[in-house]
Image (cartoon, rainbow, N blue to C red):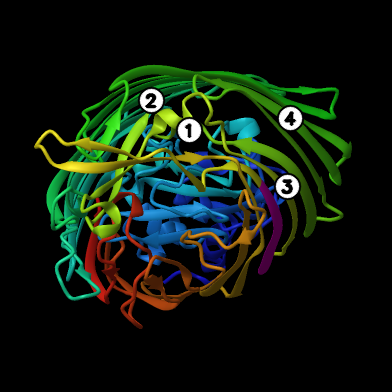
Amino acid sequence: MLSASTKLKLCLSALLLSLNCHAENQQSIDTLTSEDLLAMSLEQVMALSITTSVSKKEQNVKDSAAAVFVISAEDIRRSGATNIPEALRMAPGLQVARVNASQWAVTIRGLNDRAANKLLVLMDGRTLFFPGFSGTLWETLDMLMENIERIEVIRGPGATLWGANAVNGVINIISKNAKKTQGTQLSIAGGDEQVFGSARYGFQIDAHSFGRIHAQGKKHDSYRNTNGTDAYDGWDAQQGGVQLDLSDGDDDAVKIQSNFSRGRFDNQQTAPRLTAPYFPAVRSQQDSNMFSLLSRWDKTLSADSSFSLQAYYDYQQHEFYLPSTFHQFDLDSQYRLKLFDRHDLILGGGYRFIQDQFNNNAIFQFSPGSLDYKLYNGFIQDEITLVPEKLKFILGTKLEHNDFSGLQFLPNTRLIWSPDNNHSVWTALSKAGTTPARSKEEMDIWLTTVPASAQTGNMPVKVFGQSSFMRDRYKSEEVIAYELGYRFQTSKVSADLALFYNDYSRLPFIISAGSPSVTVSESGIPYILQPVSLINDVRGYTYGSELSGAWQATDYWKLNLTYGFLEERYKTSSGNLNRPVYGTPQNQFSLRSSFDILSNLELDFWLRYVDKLADVGEKPVSDYTSLNLRLAYRPVRNLELSVVGDNLIEPHVEFNPDIQLGDYQQTLLSRHFYLKAKLDL
């Protein structure tokens, strides 16, 4: 049995990764294994640091002038999360809603939708997004959860370092170094709605270089709609990858990473037509295939300077919305230099090339069907020490050019004051913008059909969104964000409070109608064509607060609490302020408890409350309370058996259907469980 001091070390190491300690003499955690942590003194554990996505450098979270939350590998394991969106529910300020068995709506600080385009998602520095609408298809991001080192969540703009789409926040998923995943790991799980399994093998190349390979498969059953019918949203997917972490043991490190995935997703949607029934439900199976290859070289030039160069290729082939194929190449470089003991300078640049191909159908049509486009940028940021160990000022900007909206200027200023080792106050003023997608300027969409009636001259009305109305007029959506934060940290207790006010411009909320005309379809049906278009000249603002805290009650019991409040207001062209029709709850609450009953027996519970959403048509989404329980037992050191129960209080709806695909039934999330066995050899 572990001693009390050993258990305390483990708890504090996990606590550190959850933002609960301060670093003075920093050491990188990326080079440490669990055995290293056990061998360290408590003082050494407290001095660890991590590389945060806020600054692109090694830095303790306490010293970051931004709203940062880190989800550690231990947090993920003890939560029982089986995918990335489920794990993201742990972070304050995130709106995570399950649309159905495969689809998710995820955003930070409002404006949530399946196609949300104001959140930048990365994996090991590689951008994960669907170029068709510059958003994230979460159903395709099904990586092996045991490979994740941590997930860094930045609420608020991160455009200066990371670029466009980092409007409301950045999520960076960081995988474990191959050195930490040596040997063989096998896992298998099954429950009343899903089965999944995985295999991973880690190997050593030389004294300083390591590698691993992995593969996993999942199958998920369909949910039920609120009216009791089959939602036809089941899916199955396979995913695998190879990672090499090469080093000379001194100044050079190279990461080579390749991932592939394929999936088949059942889908049911309404498809508008010109004859009755005007909105028949259509079932289909949609395939998705992805492949990526990434290489990054990190070079330490001296104690005060370093350089990195990263390149990756990304291939995507999807049948969501309409069949599409994307080839993406990205090159990014960064140089860091400390000057005169007071200036910590980071500068760099990047280039991205995308080639797409859309196979148009009756509902979605791109013109042209294939296009090449590019994005390039340069940035500089200076962290200026005004008072050593006390006061720092960060000033930076990025210039970014894309082929749709031209040049964007994305400045950023931050100030952090740390009066002592336990307290820090920070404030920030920053600007960010989205990357305009082709769907905003070059896609026509059959939105709906108004049935024939006497008012329409006994002809159906085809409401058709025509992007040609907006050609060369659709500009990047922008935000100016004001933030203020406070942190308190000791070895037992931590608290983090963030306040924000976001001022948005050029939001696409207004539909402008063109002149209707009578035309005849290819099958000879006369109808009225009513063209409409989005106009992105709407302004709006959101404000809110986010609170997170942790308490290490004993060496075997830890509590984590988060709360988020969000208010949204938008100004139409008539000057009225209205609540938006978006899937964003006003209040969210989460409480997690991790309790070690014995050294080999764990009990975890996770209670969440989510406020109601604004109605979409006649479909309200009520508030709900969810409870997850996990019990894990290790009969021997290398084997973990666990049972997880999810959503144990009440079945509920979390989000409305994708209104871009028609008004079909809401999906009901019911109670479910799964059993899992994980073996490390």
Would residue 222 appear left or right of 316 to someone viewing this image? left
Residue 500 belongs to magenta span? yes
The first of marks 4 and 1 along the sequence is 1
SS at badge 1: loop
Residue topped by disc 1: 125
Residue topped by disc 4: 396
**What percent of the width, then of the height, locates residue 50?**
59, 44
The first of marks 4 and 3 along the sequence is 3
Would residue 543 appear left or right of 467 to someone viewing this image? right
In three-dimensional space, the C-alpha distance between marks 2 and 1, rounded to whole angstroms, equals 9 Å
Closer mark to the observer between disc 4 and disc 3: 4
Residue topped by disc 3: 63
Q: Residues within 10 Å of mark 1 (few under 14, many from 20)?
A: some
Q: Are marks 2 and 1 in contact (CB under 8 Å)?
A: yes
Residue topped by disc 2: 294
Residue type at mark 4 is Gly
Q: Closest to the observer: 312 or 269? A: 269
In three-dimensional space, the C-alpha distance between marks 3 and 1, rounded to whole angstroms, equals 21 Å
**What percent of the width, then of the height, locates residue 14?**
53, 59
